[in-house]
Image: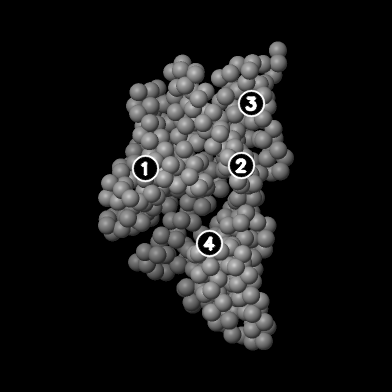
């Protein structure tokens, strides 16, 4: 009952009451399990209590505390699985528990540990999917695990292995979407898989294949957005796809088409951000769209318009930094600062120094991914050139 109350309060957004109820539920279940350690139902409830409290802490940005709860969830689920190895649903719950540990570790920048947690989850899901290949839920879980593993490998700079993981996930997503074309969720999953493959191909410099992957993703998202224009999630996905397509077209030198794609994405981002000013995700998307547009304008020699676009992006980032204290909110501001520093000439030295300070701080805290790590010497060289 207390766990149900905790769920209700989470939906209502009453965080303090949700936390109180969650702690009460966890305390009661801990006492009950201590009285009867062999009661699987109570042990399962206690494991879920750890997970739900971890969810609350993660939502509040308290990642260290969330990790403690998620780790306890994993440990308790392992005991339950050992007691009843044939219970596939417990195996599935253990895979979710491992995945949540991985999510927190990844957000903390602990990539090797995150990769291990994701691979633990993947191993369970591979067994479940092999044992019951007709179970679409198991197959979908397996696809998600491949993507999680791919995300970490990509962040570590291991692009060949990341691409393999993403393509393994894509193969499953394609089968699910083909088996049930009317399932919007499967279709959306497929669009994400194409996008992730496109991201790695872009990083590898394989622009023609990357563009094909992005356009495959875009085609799905256009259909979803057209079928349900009131779905903000579909609209947001569509905006992202326009930006991805624009990126490749820009790199290929097809500037008019790239500019059109960026403006299409920006128009959607502006509508979403205006409709929900308190949605940090929508605001961040608007920042990215302005950055894309700024890059295009700068490349076209329209410096004044480009500076205006990057200043809009930086302004949104600074609002978000004031609202959230997580490392990602700060690292996002590096791009507009870097671009403004380059566009302003000697007058942009301060912007470059601000960008460098953020990157160095995150690097020293071991919270900077491999791609952004490469930005540090580039910005240092730009500052040194301006100092001459």
Q: Mark 3 highlights which residue? A: 351
Q: Quadrant of residue 289?
A: top left
Lower position in the chain sequence, tag 2 or tag 4: 4
- Left or right: 125, with 377 as reference point: left
Q: Residues within 10 Å of mark 3 (few under 14, many from 20)?
A: many
Residue 121 spot, x, y in % from top left = 53, 61
- Which residue of the protein is positioned furthest toward the top in this rendering? 388
Nearer the observer, 36 or 154: 36
The answer to whether 353 is drawn above or below residue 387 in the figure is: below
Distance in Å between CA atoms under marks 4 and 1? 28 Å
- Left or right: 282, with 65 as reference point: left
Residue 95 spot, x, y in % from top left = 53, 65
Lower position in the chain sequence, tag 4 or tag 3: 4
Label annotation for residue 238: 1
Residue drawn at (56%, 34%) of the image? 315
Nearer the observer, 50 or 78: 50
Lower position in the chain sequence, tag 3 or tag 1: 1
Q: Mark 2 highlights which residue? A: 321
Distance in Å between CA atoms under marks 4 and 3? 38 Å
Residue 205 spot, x, y in % from top left = 46, 31
Q: Mark 4 highlights which residue? A: 13
Q: Nearer the viewer, mark 2 or mark 4?
A: 4
Instruction: Assess whether mark 4 and mark 2 are in contact (beta carbons under 8 angstroms).
Output: no
């Amino acid at each position: 009952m207390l766990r149900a109350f905790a769920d209700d309060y989470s939906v209502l957004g009453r965080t303090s009451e949700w936390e109180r109820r969650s702690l009460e539920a966890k305390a009661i279940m801990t006492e009950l399990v201590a009285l009867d350690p062999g009661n699987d139902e109570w042990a399962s409830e206690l494991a879920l209590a750890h997970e739900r409290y971890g969810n609350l802490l993660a939502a509040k940005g308290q990642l260290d505390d969330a990790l403690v709860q998620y780790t306890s969830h994993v440990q308790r689920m392992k005991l339950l699985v050992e007691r009843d190895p044939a219970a596939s649903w417990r195996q599935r719950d253990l895979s979710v528990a491992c995945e949540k540990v991985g999510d927190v570790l990844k957000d903390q920048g602990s990539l090797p540990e995150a990769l291990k947690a994701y691979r633990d989850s993947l191993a369970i899901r591979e067994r479940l999917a092999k044992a019951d290949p007709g179970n679409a839920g198991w197959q979908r879980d397996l696809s998600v695990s491949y993507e999680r593993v791919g995300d970490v490998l990509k962040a570590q700079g291991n692009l060949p292995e990341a691409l393999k993981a993403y393509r393994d996930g894509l193969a499953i997503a394609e089968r699910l979407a083909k088996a049930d074309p009317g399932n919007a969720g499967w279709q959306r999953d497929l669009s994400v898989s194409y996008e992730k493959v496109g991201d790695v191909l872009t990083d590898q410099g394989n622009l023609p294949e990357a563009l094909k992957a992005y356009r495959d993703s875009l085609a799905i998202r256009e259909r979803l957005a057209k079928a349900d224009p009131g779905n903000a999630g579909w609209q947001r996905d569509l905006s992202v796809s326009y930006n991805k397509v624009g990126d490749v077209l820009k790199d290929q030198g097809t500037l008019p088409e790239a500019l059109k794609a960026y403006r299409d994405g920006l128009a959607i981002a502006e509508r979403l951000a205006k409709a929900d000013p308190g949605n940090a995700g929508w605001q961040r998307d608007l920042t990215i769209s302005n950055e894309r547009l700024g890059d295009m304008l700068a490349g076209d020699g329209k410096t004044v318009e480009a500076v205006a676009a990057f200043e809009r992006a930086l302004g949104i980032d600074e609002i978000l930094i004031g609202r959230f204290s997580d490392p990602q909110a700060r690292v996002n501001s590096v791009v507009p600062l870097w671009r403004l520093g380059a566009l302003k000439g000697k007058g942009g030295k301060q912007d470059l120094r601000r960008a460098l300070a953020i990157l160095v701080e995150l690097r020293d805290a071991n919270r900077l991914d491999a791609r952004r790590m490469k930005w540090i010497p580039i910005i240092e060289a730009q500052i040194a050139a301006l100092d001459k």
